[in-house]
Structures are given as structure tokens and as C-alpha cells.
Amino acid sequence: MQTIPQDYQPAKDLLKNRTILVTGATDGIGEAAAHTFAAHGATVILLGRNVKKLEYVYDQMVEAGYPQPAIYPMDLEGATDADYAEMATMIENEFQTLDGLLHNAARLDALMPLEQYDLKMWARLLQVNLTAPFLMTRACLPLLRKSADASVIFTSSGVAHKGRAYWGAYAVTKAGCDNLMETLSDEVEANTAIRVNSIDPGRVRTKMRKKAFPGEDPMILPTPEEIMLPYLYLIGPDSKGQTGKIFSV
């Protein structure tokens, strides 16, 4: 497990002239990342399934004076190859290249023993948490290759590194994402300017955390805004040469 330099301080214009796609951009870590990237100069493409929430985040970013973001509604559970191809075409038409991709969107659904899983729930979590990041990355690779310095960030978890009772499909998908990250990094490292890493955000004050631990006092946890330094480090140029690694917050 890697950590960013302890004295890391990102420049205010760290992400100027960069276009970054953030999934799950309407809540929690994704929303915080979208605001943080934009505050450092990036044009952010907000991707989520709830149009009203996307519009709310969009309006907040415009009011803050950040570079005008873009909205792309997509339901990862039902998205097909054609949907991802259409998304990539839109990005190419509007922005020509893609400099960053943060895979933040995920589902937890419920904690339960494996023997209680039905196929529908298992398939839904694999689709949203693992297959969707694969399909999206594959569709975006030609755009990422056009960038002089591109970064892809997957979201890891403590249960990805060691399986834990009742975490079921969520844990399996997060372990899969770590392996997907390492595989992709190994494939693109030699002949592209694309870096690929994962971030394990740890315990954060999010809706998903509350769902998993309803009895926990959320006020003892850091907010998503308080854990953004590793995201800035990895999405921006300061992490050149870093690829194929899992970073902890």
C-alpha cells in the first residue's frame, strides 16, 4: 500500500486545461472530487444516473466560478457497449481528449452471507462495480491516449485486500478492480502516457459507509472533502511515474 508525499501541496492551477470524467459525481467522494478538480482548474464531466442531482452539482460549480462542467447522465447498471461508445464520441466531439478518469461510482446494496445472495443482486453489483469500469475505460482509452499526461483512478477498499464475512459481491468487485487496475497499468505503461492507480479511501463520512455501519457515529469520520489530497496527486501531473499501485488515504 502506497501513500502520497507527506508534504504534498498541489498548485492552485494543477489541473488547468485538463478534462476529467468523474463517475458517481452526485454524492460523497465523487461530488467532492468533482468540486476539488474544478477548483484546481479542470473541466469536469459529471457522470451519474440522477439528472436532478447532476444539475444541482453543475449549478454549484458554475456559481463557484469554476470552469464550466459537463453533465452526462448514465445508469451503469443498464449501460451497454453502445452506450459507452456514444459517451466516448460525445467527449471526443466536445473536448477532443480526456486527461483523467475517476471510477468512483459503486453499489453496496446489503451485507449478508454468501449463501443468501440471489443471482440478480450478485449480477447487479458485478455490473456496476466491476464490468462498468472495464467497459468505460475500454471506451475511453483512445481519448486518454491523445492526452500528453493521462491518469485513470480506480476505487479500492479494505475488503478488497482481505475478504471479510458478509461483504460478498462488493468485496469481490473491489478486489477485481484492483486486479483490473494492475493489468491495465502493465499493458499501457510502456507505450502511452497513461498512469493507472487505485485509491483506498478508508473510512469516510458517506451514505455508503452509513449503510454499512448504521450504528457508527459519522462525526468521528473525515468528510470526503478532507481526503482529497491523494486524488489531486494521482489525477494530476505531480504523480508522473506512479502507476500500477494502490494508495491509501
Image (spheres, rainbow, N blue to C red):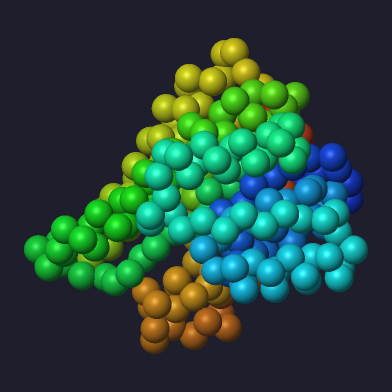
Q: Evaluate whether residue 27 shows in this view.
A: yes
Residue 228, percent across and down? 68, 57
Q: Left or right: 120 with respect to 211?
A: left
The residue depicted at 68 percent of the width and 51 percent of the height is 45
Residue 206 higher or lower than 175, as above or below: below
Q: Left or right: 233 with respect to 88?
A: right
The residue depicted at 50 percent of the width and 66 percent of the height is 203
Closer-to-camera residue (229/96): 96
Residue 101 in which image quadrant: top right
Count the numbered circles shown: 0
The residue depicted at 65 percent of the width and 41 percent of the height is 90
Residue 219 in which image quadrant: bottom right
Residue 81 in which image quadrant: top left
Q: Evaluate whether residue 247 shows in this view.
A: no
Q: Left or right: 68 with respect to 207?
A: right
Closer-to-camera residue (107/69): 69
The residue depicted at 45 percent of the width and 72 percent of the height is 209
In the orientation shown, which residue stands out farthest toward the top? 191
On-image quarter of the C terminus: bottom right
Residue 61, percent across and down? 79, 65
Residue 159, percent across and down? 35, 55
Residue 47 higher or lower than 97, as above or below: below
Residue 238 higher or lower than 212, as above or below: above
Q: Left or right: 91 with respect to 84?
A: right
Closer-to-camera residue (62/114): 62
Residue 94 higher or lower than 158, as above or below: above
In the orientation shown, which residue stands out farthest toward the left? 115
Residue 181, percent across and down? 46, 35
Closer-to-camera residue (63/211): 63
